[in-house]
Structure formats: C-alpha cells, structure tokens
Image: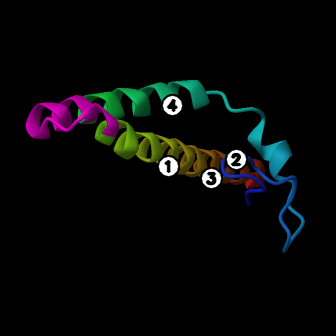
Amino acid sequence: MFAAPAGLAEECSACGLDFLALERGGRFVGVVTMLLALVLIMAALGVDEWLRPPLWASFLFWAPVTVGSVIGVLRLYKTMWVYHQYEESQQP
C-alpha cells in the first residue's frame, strides 16, 4: 500500500486498486501531525522532569522516537482514510 515510508503507492500490486484516486489529498495530515507533536512534547517534558537526562541523551532518544512516531501515525491515518474512501465508493 505504501511506496515510501509515509507515501501511498499509485496502485495495489495485487489487485490494481488505484490508491491515489481514493486518497484525494491529505486533508487533516497537518492536524494529525500537530496533535502528535503536542503529545510528544508533553512526553518529553515529563521525561525531562522525571529523569533529568543530559541534553545529548534527550536528542539521542527523542529524534528517532519523533521520526518513527510521525511515520507510524501518518501510515495509520492514510490507511484509515483510504479504507474509508473505498467503503464510501462501494456503497450504491
């Protein structure tokens, strides 16, 4: 379903379903990303208050966590959006 970490493929390799026609642009991708950023900032502040790690350790931990979280959440959101659009297009 995905050709890049968070980018949809043009079509399904098994059945030929056109994913790009179903996606119609990411309407709320920015909102989803901002909500995730808020959650990650709150978590980082909580960890900093609780453990008081050095700055280099915070960067070493939070950089890959942020990248992985954004890619994971965008993949989940886009999968749900394409599924929703597919279900809508199949109803008479």
Position in image of residue 78 (x %, y %)? 63, 46
Badge 1 amino acid: Gly
Answer left or right for 23 relative to 70.
Answer: right
Residue 15 appears at what percent x and percent y? 86, 71
* Marks 4 and 2, how far apart at CA: 25 Å
**Looking at the picture, which amino acid does disc 4 mark?**
Thr
The residue at 77%/49% (across/down) is 89
- Label disc, if present, on residue 79 of the rendered structure: 3
- Name the residue carrying label 4: 33
Residue underneath mark 1: 68
Decide which of 82, 68 is in the foreground and name it: 68
Question: What residue appears at the point 31 percent right and 38 percent down from the top-left corner?
Answer: 58
Badge number at residue 88: 2
> Does 26 appear in magenta?
no
Asked if the residues shown at circle 3 and circle 2 are in contact, with their CB atoms under 8 angstroms apart, the answer is no
- Horizontal side, residue 39 vs residue 20: left or right: left
Q: Judge whether 44 appears above or below 74 on screen.
A: above
Please give the name of the residue rendered at 30% of the width and 42% of the height, measured from the top-left corner: 57
- Specify few, some or many for label 1: CA neighbours under 10 Å numbering under 14, 14-19, or 20 or more: few
